[in-house]
Amino acid sequence: MEVPKLQETIRELSVDRQESSEAIVKKVAEEVQNLQAALAEQKKDSEETEEAMLDMIKEVVSKIKVEIETEKRNRETSEGNLLALLESTCSKLQLTITV
């Protein structure tokens, strides 16, 4: 009579162990899935941040190029005005000297 009872206990323990193992596997699978989702979200955020930074850098470079061109034109205009003034002054001085 003890043998059937032991067999039943062993069978119950085996079923309990199998259920526990399945629960652990299920929980581990859920955690792995959660980690994968978190990693995917983090990767997406990182890519978006990188893209935003690149856009900002491009914008800054563009503004700097515009400022450089503006300064170049202003300098060329100033140099032209200064040269014209010098030429005018030289002409006036020559007229004054020759008279």
Image: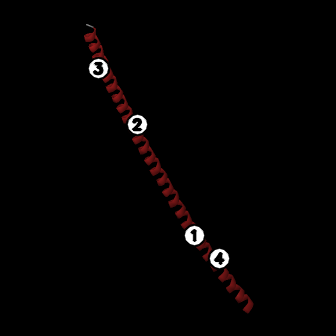
Q: Which quadrant is the N terminus positioned in?
A: top left
Nearer to us: label 3 or label 4: 3
Mark 3 to mark 2 CA distance (whole Å): 30 Å
Q: Which mark is residue 15?
A: 3
Q: Which mark is residue 82?
A: 4
Mark 4 to mark 2 CA distance (whole Å): 69 Å
Nearer to us: label 1 or label 3: 3
On the image, the x and y values in percent for residue 27 come to 36, 28
> Which residue corresponds to the image point at 54% horizontal and 67% vertical from the top-left?
69
Q: What residue is disc 2 on?
A: 35
Nearer to us: label 3 or label 2: 3
Tell me if 3 is positioned left or right of 98 in this view: left
Q: What residue is disc 1 on?
A: 72
Q: Which quadrant is the C terminus positioned in?
A: bottom right
On the image, the x and y values in percent for residue 72 come to 57, 70
Q: Amino acid at mark 1?
A: Lys
User: Residue 95, relative to residue 4: is it above or below?
Assistant: below
Labels 1 and 4 touching (C-beta < 8 A): no
Q: Earlier in the sequence, mark 4 or mark 2?
A: 2
On the image, the x and y values in percent for residue 11 come to 27, 17
User: Is residue 99 in view from this perspective?
Assistant: no
